Amino acid sequence: MVSPAIALALLPLLITLIIRYRYFFVLLYRAVLIRWVRDCLSGLSREERAFQYILTHATPGDSQSILDTFDQWCSKVEFISNIGPKKGKILDRLLQEHCPITVLELGTHCGYSTVRIARSLPIGARIYSVEMDERNAAVAEKIIRLAGFDEDMVEQIVRPSDEVIPRLREDFGVERLDFVFMDHWKRCYLPDLRLLEDSGLLGEGSIILADNVIFPGAPNFLRHARRCGLYEVRVHRATLEYIRGIRDGMAELTFLGVK
Amino acid sequence: MPRHKLIASESDVSVEVEDEGKDNEFSIYYVEVEENFEGGKEKQATRDGKRRRVRNSEVGRRASEKRTNEAGNKRAEKKHDKRHKTARKEGEKHGRKQRRKNADADEAEEESGKEKKNIKNERTKTLKLEDEKEKDVKKKRKKHVKNEEDNAKPEKTKHKDCHDMPLKEKKKKRKKPETISESESKSEPESQSDSDSESKDNPAVGVLGSLTPEELEKLKEAVDERKKLIATLRGKPWPMRKKLVVLRESQEFVEKYEGALGKGKGRKLYAYKVMMMKKWMKFQRDFENFKTACIPWEMKIKEIESHFGSSVASYFIFLRWMYGINMILFGLTFGLVMVPEALMGKPYGSLPRKTVPRGEEASAMNFAVLWDFGGYAKYSVLFYGYYNSQRAIGWLKFRMPLSYFLVGVGTVAYSYMVVIRTMARNANEEGGGDDTSFNFSWKTFTSWDYLIGNPETADNKFASITTSFKETIVEEQESRKDDNIHLTRFLRVLANFLVLCCLAGSGYLIYFVVRRSQKFALEGLEKYGWWERNEVNMVMSLLGMFCPMLFDVISTLENYHPRIALQWQLGRIFALFLGNLYTFIIALMDAIQLKRAEEEIVKKNMTIWQANLYNGTMPDNSTAPPFTAHPADVPRGPCWETMVGQEFVRLIISDTMTTYITLLIGDFFRAVLVRFLNNCWCWDLEFGFPSYSEFDVSGNVLGLIFNQGMIWMGAFYAPCLPALNLLRLHVSMYLQCWAVMCCNVPQERVFKASGSNNFYMAMLLVILFLSTLPAIYTIVTIPPSFDCGPFSGKNRMFDVIQETLETDFPAWFGKVFSYASNPGLVLPFLLLLVLAIYYLQSTSKTYKRVNMELKKKLQTQNEENKKKNKLAALKAANELEQQRSNSASDLGVNEESSSLDEAGHHRQAGHNGRFIHPSQHTQNSGPPVTSTHTTTRTPASRGHTSSGHLPGHPHQPQKNSHSKRR
């Protein structure tokens, strides 16, 4: 029988853990518990709830308004791991610097990042947005249309990314990718990067931007990118979207060309 | 390639080159003229005449030529005289001489400058000799030219002189034109003595025929120079790539030619010398390595330092230092107390105090003895109670009780001495003055930790520097605004309040537990389980483990620099541990009182028992010895000293175990889990939630310090403690080194541990003081047990001193001692000591102030100098600009003046060689800045600034190169 004194002596440990990892507890609460409760109550998926909120609160055709509403919903109501406003600024800056013509987006999810990319692209540019989940893709399509981007601008592909990438050239006639944005399963970052290398779609100066490389993290991806020598790697440090205390980063890979 | 480097590396050679620049310039024409004449098969006489004419025309120039050649001439003549002696010896000597000369070229220059006037007189006096010299001069000049031409145009190597030389030598020649020309000028007198007319063609033959030792000399010299170059390469202001190339080339050169040197006996000698030198160097290097290897764990610590920065390494250095101290303590107790008792004292079982009592015999060999130190371990030399109070033991008449007492006092005294000495030495290193005045410069120039060798750590450091820059900028802005200072202050106060609450809570918890354990002890421990029995230890180690973590979390509120945060953290944990320790001591004191009460009862019972024994075993006759009871059966007192020692040993052991287990679970298993679960986990374990642990500097340092405090406290009652501690430190050195390298990650904010060592020392001193207090208190106030330990039967432990004084020393010594310990003498002495300390302290304060003022003065002076230099540089730049524009405007005038300068020479050249004149002209008129321009201008610019010579300087070599190419 453990005496109460020993249990009390463990109190500092408990307090320490709670204080140190408070943001993770908050994240756990918001991303898992609330979601579960709401799923049970409403019978809708999280993405559909988000769409309902946006439909009722945002101005159709105004991409900025849609993005703001999205941010509001994610920070006030529920949590969806979009790219978020702060990291989105980095994305915007990169897009404005490089003015890509062909953009590949892996992981559309709700279409937040697609809208964000599409609004800062030059005229005539084209986004190929890959999403595996059909329900999410449907929501994303609605949101993209709501923001006023048509099919010429955004081409949605509802298939797993590892099937899409090797067939991009044949099926969609893509010759070169100027910009690749990765925000799907963190585990798929590395295999997809390899596929991209093999496909030959990357040209010199192509940018690959990978979100969430620190939290939840894609260590193998980063290690490969640093070691293989094909890329110039920069990690933009930031915090996780909608939660301040968790550090995160985006990896910007500039393809240097085949040796 | 290597040639110009070689020259560049040696100032003497380059000086000569510069000095002879004019001669070269002139001699070019001369040689070409000569060649023309050669083609025409002119007579020697006419040539001589022409030479004289030349000499006449360039009176001003001659002096400088003269001096360079004079040295060579003299040497050559000397050489010539000695030629008939054994070549080898001579060669060696000469080689040395020449080397010296090369090294002292500047001095020679000055000497020759003095000689200038004498030369003229000499010339007028001895014309014939002069003539010869003149010839030498010319030959030498010619040689020069040929060398230069050799260098500039390799295809021109088909000169007569060079033609029959072996290729190797030619190469050498190209590498070292100066030495060759000199040595060849040496050779010339020989050829001259043969025939004047053939003087031009013959030297080469002479070189081949008789100059092989000379060549060897040169070779040797070149090799030596290479060696010198290799030795001094590190200090050269070259880029690293160039250094590497030069080093490799020089090493190859040395390797190649070193073996080929010498012949016969000399060669062997030389080879031997070289071999010995190499062996010596190797030995020296090995010895250095050996010395490093002799410093225990040096390599390990360096490795850790390179990976984790100096703050983590400072812990290990401290640990090593502690190990050294404990080694000495162990040597004292082991050599002067434990070994004599084990060897010479009465053996086990001879006395009740040296025997396991009957009641404990059953469990005396249990496994628990290993960590409880009961049973046989309790009744051994490891503890106080085993020692006998016999005054002298063995054939050595070893004074055991006295030795025991003196060792106990001596260990503490030694520790005080060492700690204070180290503190004083460290204090010298830190300078006064506030470092906050140039915050950004400090950050820019000193924030890199040059001991980091790991790319990841370097990345971390890079990141931390950038963040710290950001932070500093933000801080600066904040301080300008200074509205947030209240918030910071509030947060700091709040943090301290929280920490105080934690401390109070933990103190109360320990107090509660100790009280409870006393209750348990009174009721008998047998009724309770393991948890209750070990409650105090558990609670104490748990609190000691987790409270620091809480403090760490709280300290993020305060937003201090990590170094200051570390000190705060150290202070807080210090308070926590101190509280724990003193609670423990107070509990111990209570236990001692209990034991003493028990002892009184035993004492009374003892007499009854003895009387019973006496009555029972001694019926009538007294043939049998009076006491036949086995020592194990004899009733005995509780012996509080052994109890105290045992408590300390247990504490140390449980502490060590806790540390190691924490290390194993908290670091190793965590690292293993993170590492291998990371492949199949939904987030990044390495960067995210558990991640790898960081090395906890403050906790470890304090653990070490408190451990040492317990050793100091308990060592008097348990002589085995230093040995145990030594073992612990040894193991933890290896274990922690391994754990750090294998399971920890570098801290996110790697910082330098400057000055933290003294902080550790200060804490150690405090702990030493605080731990000697209870030990001294018990020694002085509590009478020792009546039936165990070296002081049994005495009223107080320190009575042993008095006893020794009375019995072992002559009577007068005791008298003197009693006089000396008279308060009338002691008090003034103490007063004197206090005064001396005060005096020394005030003087040191004064010195410090003076130092500070000096520092300030230096700073201001520096600033002034900086300003002055800036002004001067500006001025010089302006002036240079002006002169540039001036020179650009009146180029023609300059040209004329330059042509006037070399008028005689031009005329001469114009007469004899037709190619020369135009080329000379182009040289003068081509770029606006030429040799003559610079000579007119340099004095003006040199007057203003140290960089004034810059405009003139670079043209000198340029001119040389011009002349070389021609």
Image (cartoon, rainbow, N blue to C red):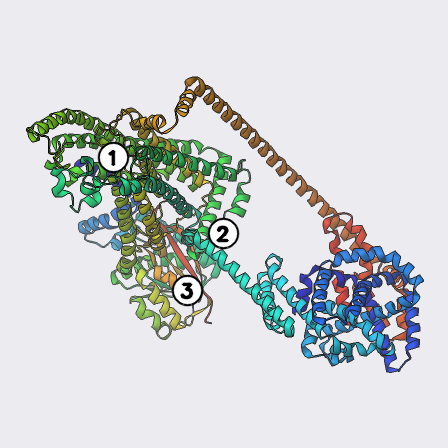
- Which disc, if any, is residue A227? 3
Residue mark closest to the camera, 3 vs 1 = 1
Quote the CA–CA distance across marks 2 and 3: 25 Å
- Whether marks 3 and 1 lie on the same chain: no
Quote the CA–CA distance across marks 3 and 1: 71 Å
Disc 3 is placed on an element classified as: helix
Disc 2 is placed on an element classified as: loop
Q: Name the amino acid type tagged 1.
A: Asn
Residue mark closest to the camera, 1 vs 2 = 1
Q: Name the amino acid type tagged 2.
A: Tyr
The residue identified by callout 2 is B450
How many residues crowd mark 2 within 10 Å: few (<14), some (14–19), many (20+)?
A: few
Quote the CA–CA distance across marks 1 and 2: 58 Å
Q: Of residues B931 and B252, which is closer to you in this image?
A: B252
The residue identified by callout 1 is B388
Work out which quarter of the rendered image holds the C terminus of chain B and state it: bottom right
